[in-house]
Image (cartoon, rainbow, N blue to C red):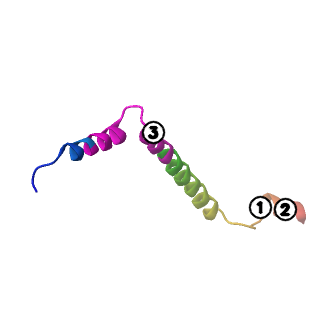
Amino acid sequence: MGAMSFWHWAIVIVVVLVLFGGRGKLSSIMGDAAKGIRAFKDGMKEDDKAKDEPVGTITRTEDKEKH
């Protein structure tokens, strides 16, 4: 029960190589996911800035031109 067979060790080694491989697909997937998260956060910041600006207000110079 406590001893691991050859197949257990082989599976563990394969999983470690896939997860921590230098040029593995997982590292590129994680990099792409990080870029996506960063783009999402930047988009949310832009939305917050747009919400802070009043919509439909007339500035003082526009008001003078209409009268």
The crowd level at tag 2 (other Cα within 10 Å; few <14, some 14-19, many 20+) is: few
Q: Is residue 61 above or below residue 10?
A: below
User: What amino acid is labelled 3 in the image?
Assistant: Lys
Residue appearing at x 75%, y 67% in the figure: 56
User: What amino acid is labelled 2 in the image?
Assistant: Lys
Secondary-structure class at tag 3? helix
Please identify, in this view, whether the residue under mark 3 or under mark 1 is nearer the observer: 3
Q: Which of the labelled discs sits on residue 21, or is there none?
A: none
Q: Position of residue 34 (x, y in %)?
A: 47, 46
Question: In the picture provided, is 63 more to the left or to the right than 32?
Answer: right
Residue appearing at x 53%, y 49% in the figure: 36
- Point out the stretch of residues depicted in magenta: 11-33
Question: In the picture provided, is 37 more to the left or to the right than 63?
Answer: left
Q: Position of residue 38 (x, y in %)?
A: 51, 48
Q: Which residue is mark 1?
A: 60
Q: Position of residue 48 (x, y in %)?
A: 57, 61
Proximity of marks 2 and 1: CB atoms separated by less than 8 Å: yes
Front residue (pair 64, 6) = 6
Question: Magenta includes 50?
Answer: no
Please identify, in this view, whether the residue under mark 3 or under mark 2 is nearer the observer: 3
Front residue (pair 46, 57) = 46
Secondary-structure class at tag 1? helix
For marks 3 and 1 on the same chain, the one whose residue lies earlier in the sequence: 3
